[in-house]
């Protein structure tokens, strides 16, 4: 069962490595070139013993007509041969090393790129569920196993096998009986390898899981360092990490112990094989069946022949840990993309901006996000979405941008189900300011131009001015070239929000989505932003989620949500009815009056 699994895995790995087949063939050929060199290696010793020190003639294929049949000539030949073999072996090693490194790195980067590309296309449900660390671990730490398996596993095992066959063949021409005796240990090694591989595989799966979860602790700690410091929980986090690390150390030590025991067993088996061959070889020399030089050659071959056997056996156990890793990487690649683009999805250049939700129900797993919601938004409308925290406001926006597909019902854009459009075309229709403005570790200008990489400096500046952020950016020492730090950590919440507003302003899309765009700015900045947004809203459908009533005063339509249900829909903000709604939802009438300036 396990070997069947290994075989299909091996097939998949070879398929994955197929684009590099030419270089891989080069590595195999260079590896095979080492066989004649290895076979020639004991020959100078044989010549020295038999033809220089002894009185036997040189092997027939080595006697040259021009060379005097003296022992001095044989010695020159032996020494020259040794040097030539040394030089060629070094050259072969150098070329192999270069090609192996280059091909290995290429295999890993191609595999990593493919994994990242696939992971980016997985739905948000996948990302919500799995978080960032586990996929990151698979991409960064599990993907390199392809290099180890192919370059340090399969190819050397193949070359070792060929070397073994070659040496056996030469041994057999010298003395068949000795060759067969030397071979006797092979089945023992095979059985040992099989037993050990299974154990290594089981343990390495556990170690990998612990490793991945230890990494998620590190990431969580570093990503939430402010909260940890604020609540003084450094010691607790440290202890959590140490506990997990100790488990990993235990697992890793047990794995290493298993491998060490296995290596000892292999070494003992090999020693037994060598000793038996030596014992019987001496008997054969005494009986006059072979010369001393030939015994030396056989013994040198046995030493070298066991090397490939040892390599094949030890690689087999190492392969198990690498197989575990590559299986995890393949599992990520096998995650189904559940947001499918229709095979004949239609193109959408620029939507008019008419949105309709028809009986939309949506579940995040088993948790209800929206329940049977229906509404229609005409093009160019300014729509406010209100409701308590967790009422489903962001969910509406998520479904509209097709981050998720509804569990039932339909979302329509310009009268067509959004699932009929090409996903990239659909997403281009939206400029978004998310609830939690996220910036990249780049300059402010690059962040503003994130959706429009070709925007000119003048356009970037105009967008910043519209978002009322030009002044604070210009006041920074490096202006628009200032770096904002990872996730924008070097800016205040309000500054981050204004940059993300500028980013949305720069992208001239027919639908503008603002998920609480002014939640972390002061009242003065909010008023300035709303004024700028007012100009931007013209001619496009704007959907704005807001908790503050003041933000909603420019809206000409309000959707009120409660526990995932649409409880109120007003064509415009009518003071009387709006107060009714706002009172029943906890907004004080006084605040409403104040904010709405009525
Ligand atoms: N990724 C998710 N996985 C599971 N449940 C979720 C997820 N996102 C939201 N929910 C749940 O769905 C419901 C609606 O969430 P939503 O984010 O739409 O609320 P909201 O109205 O935007 O709230 P807020 O004003 O706090 O932003 C909530 O009960 C929330 O717990
Ligand atoms: Mg929200």
Image (cartoon, helix red, strand yellow):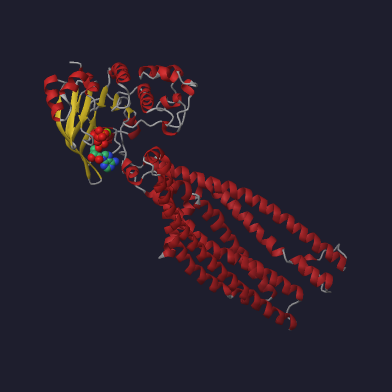
Question: Within the image, what quadrant is residue 8 found in?
Answer: bottom left
Q: Please determine whether, in this image, residue 466 is positioned above or below residue 41.
A: above
Task: Tell which residue pokes out farthest to the front in this image.
Answer: 232
Answer with left or right where residue 125 lies relative to residue 310: left
Q: Nearer the viewer, residue 589 or 345?
A: 589
Question: Which residue does the image show at 53% across and 54% down from the upper left?
Answer: 148
Q: Nearer the viewer, residue 236 or 554?
A: 236
Res. 176 in view: no
Q: Please determine whether, in this image, residue 593 is positioned above or below residue 289.
A: above
Residue 461, x across and y down, in percent = 42, 18
Q: Nearer the viewer, residue 391 or 185?
A: 391
Q: How many marks?
A: 0
Residue 5, x across and y down, in percent = 42, 61
Question: Which residue does the image show at 36% across and 25% down from the upper left?
Answer: 494
Q: Please determine whether, in this image, residue 382 is positioned above or below residue 51.
A: above
Residue 146, x across and y down, in percent = 50, 52
Question: Which residue does the image show at 77% across and 61% down from the upper left?
Answer: 82
Answer with left or right where residue 159 lies relative to residue 14: right
Q: Quarter of the image containing the N terminus?
A: bottom left
Question: Which residue does the image show at 28% across and 19% down from the upper left?
Answer: 537
């Amino acid at each position: 069962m396990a070997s069947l699994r290994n075989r299909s895995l091996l097939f998949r790995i070879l398929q994955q490595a197929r684009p590099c087949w030419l270089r891989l063939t080069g590595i195999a050929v260079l590896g095979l070139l080492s066989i004649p060199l290895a076979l020639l290696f004991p020959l100078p010793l044989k010549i020295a013993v038999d033809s220089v020190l002894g009185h036997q003639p040189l092997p027939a294929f080595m006697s040259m007509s021009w060379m005097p049949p003296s022992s001095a000539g044989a010695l020159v030949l032996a020494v020259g041969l040794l040097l030539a073999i040394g030089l060629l072996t070094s050259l072969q090693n150098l070329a192999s090393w270069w090609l192996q490194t280059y091909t290995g790195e290429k295999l890993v980067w191609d595999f990593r790129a493919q994994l990242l590309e696939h992971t980016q296309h997985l739905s948000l449900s996948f990302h919500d569920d799995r978080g960032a660390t586990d996929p990151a671990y698979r991409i960064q730490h599990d993907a390199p196993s392809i290099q180890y398996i192919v370059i340090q596993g399969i190819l050397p095992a193949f070359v070792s096998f060929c070397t073994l066959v070659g040496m056996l063949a030469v041994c057999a021409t010298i003395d068949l009986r000795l060759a067969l005796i030397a071979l006797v240990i092979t089945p023992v090694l095979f059985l040992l390898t099989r037993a050990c591989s299974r154990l290594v595989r089981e343990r390495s799966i556990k170690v990998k899981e612990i490793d991945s979860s230890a990494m998620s602790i590190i990431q969580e700690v570093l990503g939430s360092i402010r909260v940890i410091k604020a609540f003084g929980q450094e010691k607790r986090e440290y202890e959590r990490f140490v506990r997990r690390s100790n488990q990993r150390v235990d697992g890793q030590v047990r794995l290493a112990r298993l491998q060490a025991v296995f290596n000892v067993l292999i070494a003992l088996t090999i020693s037994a094989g060598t000793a038996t061959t030596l014992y019987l070889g001496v008997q054969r020399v005494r009986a006059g069946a072979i010369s001393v030089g030939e015994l030396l050659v056989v013994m040198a071959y046995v030493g070298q022949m066991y090397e490939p056997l040892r390599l094949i056996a030890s690689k087999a156990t190492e392969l198990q840990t690498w197989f575990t890793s590559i299986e995890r990487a393949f599992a990520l690649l096998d995650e189904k993309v559940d947001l499918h683009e229709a095979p004949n999805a239609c193109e959408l250049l620029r939507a008019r901006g008419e949105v309709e939700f028809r009986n939309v129900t949506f579940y995040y797993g088993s948790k209800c996000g929206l329940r049977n919601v229906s509404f229609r938004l005409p093009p160019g409308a300014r729509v406010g979405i209100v409701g308590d925290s967790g009422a489903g406001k962001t969910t509406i926006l998520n479904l509209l941008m097709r981050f998720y597909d509804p569990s039932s019902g339909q979302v329509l854009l310009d009268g067509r189900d959004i699932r009929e459009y090409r996903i990239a075309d659909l997403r281009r229709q939206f400029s978004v300011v998310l609830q939690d403005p996220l910036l990249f570790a780049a300059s402010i200008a690059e962040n503003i131009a994130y959706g429009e990489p070709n925007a000119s400096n003048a356009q970037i500046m105009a967008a910043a001015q519209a978002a009322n952020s030009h002044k604070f950016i210009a006041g920074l020492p490096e202006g628009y070239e200032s770096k904002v730090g990872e996730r924008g950590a070097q800016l205040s919440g309000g500054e981050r929000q204004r940059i993300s507003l500028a980013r949305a302003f720069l992208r001239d899309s027919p639908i503008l989505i603002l998920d609480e765009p002014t939640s972390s700015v002061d009242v003065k900045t909010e008023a300035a932003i709303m004024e700028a947004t007012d100009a931007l809203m013209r001619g496009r459908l704007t959907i704005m989620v807001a908790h503050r009533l003041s933000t909603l005063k420019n809206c000409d339509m309000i959707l009120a949500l409660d526990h995932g249900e649409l409880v109120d829909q007003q064509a415009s903000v009518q003071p009387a009815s709006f107060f009714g709604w706002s009172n029943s939802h906890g907004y004080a009438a006084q605040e409403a009056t104040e904010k709405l300036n009525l």
